[in-house]
Image (cartoon, rainbow, N blue to C red):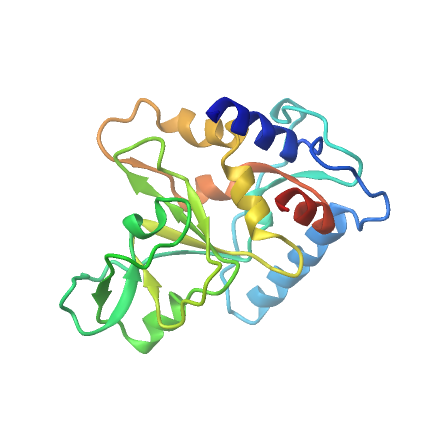
Amino acid sequence: IDALKQTILQLAVMGKLVSQDPSDEPAAALLERIAAEKARLVKEKKIKKEKPLSVISEDEKPFELPQGWEWERFGRVFLDLKYGTSQKSDYLIDGNPVLRIPNVAGGSISLDDLKFSKLSETEMNDLALAEGDLLFIRSNGSLGIVGRCVVVDICLDGFAFAGYLVRARIPKSNFCSHFISLSMDTSYVRNQIEQPIRSTSGVKNINSTEISNLIIPVPPLFEQRRIVT
């Protein structure tokens, strides 16, 4: 069953699960809009300017994409990456609820077993969670858990997230967060995550640079939604 699920997932991100619609706006147009939005946010000092990402070589592309799709590094898809709080959290602290690895490791957000941290207003603004955000597990002793992500698809006003997690803010007008989440579970992306840290002993990590450099297929927006459905 697991092999069947992985095969269906792989067919989905190759564009072979649902029919293509040539009238869909091509992915290149989405990526141009995301680049323009990031440039605006940098100019307004709402996000920091990122280091340039390397061009994807032909050798890095594992299969041919349908017309209108693009290969792209994940760093050109999200608007911002943010590490979680390093403040101490506990059950008895009178403060804000903080999502930890147990709250996201099951593939969806669980509000069971919450701990709390005393955070300033500035910290809460920095660590706020919006619908469509992705939360990645960046550090864990288990290789199979590092780099897994979950979509914020419920209202989490007043919540923050812990330091072993990292938030990727996705521009919802151009990208379907659930499609990205599916892409991150494919064997192709998992190999990019796991191979560099496979021989690491103890706690295994993926940092913001490594997350930004992940290569994913980018379909037109309506195609993303059809695949998720």
**What percent of the width, then of the height, locates residue 48?**
49, 60
Q: Is residue 64 left or right of residue 139?
A: right
**What percent of the width, then of the height, locates residue 194?**
41, 28
**What percent of the width, then of the height, locates residue 212?**
50, 44
Q: Extreme left residue here?
A: 92
Above or below, 71 against 60 in this view is: below
* Residue 135 in view of the camera: yes
Above or below, 151 against 14 in this view is: below
Q: Extreme right residue here?
A: 23
Front position in the image: 209 or 87: 87
Q: Is residue 174 left or right of residue 97?
A: right
**What percent of the width, then of the height, locates residue 182?**
54, 40
* Residue 52 in view of the camera: no
- Counting the numbered discs, the total is 0
Front position in the image: 152 or 32: 152
Q: Is residue 20 left or right of residue 39?
A: right
Name which quarter of the figure residue 12 lies in.
Answer: top right
**Residue at 18% from the left image edge and 74% from the top image edge:** 94
**Residue at 38% from the left image edge and 65% from the top image edge:** 127
Q: Extreme front residue here?
A: 1
